[in-house]
Amino acid sequence: MPARSGRFFKKPYPVRCAVGISALAIEGMRVEVTAMAMAMKIAG
């Protein structure tokens, strides 16, 4: 079925999806790093 989906969606759709997922992942990592830094500051 993946070959057929190209007709229904314009090409940017999956790209936008991937970009959104990457942005979420980067944001999540940033939050995690910040939380770890805060925890280290509190602990130290």
Image (cartoon, rainbow, N blue to C red):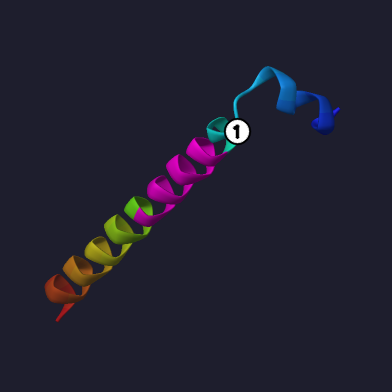
Q: Nearer the viewer, residue 12 or 23?
A: 12
Q: Position of residue 17 (x, y in %)?
A: 52, 36
- The number of numbered discs placed on residues in the rendered structure image is 1
In the displayed structure, does residue 12 sit left or right of residue 23? right
Q: Residue furthest bottom?
A: 44
Asked whether 25 falls inside the magenta stretch, the response is: yes
Residue for point 46% across, 50% down: 22
Q: Which residues are magenta?
A: 15-26
Under circle 1, the secondary element is loop
Q: Position of residue 39 (x, y in %)?
A: 21, 68
The image quadrant that residue 43 belongs to is bottom left
Residue for point 21% across, 71% down: 37
Which kind of residue does numbered mark 1 sit on? Lys
Judged by its main secondary structure, the magenta piece is helix
The image quadrant that residue 1 belongs to is top right
In the displayed structure, does residue 33 sit left or right of residue 8? left
The image shows residue 33, relative to residue 21, as above or below, that is below
Give the labeled residue for mark 1.
11
Residue for point 27% across, 68% down: 36
In the displayed structure, does residue 33 sit left or right of residue 24? left
Residue for point 60% across, 33% down: 11
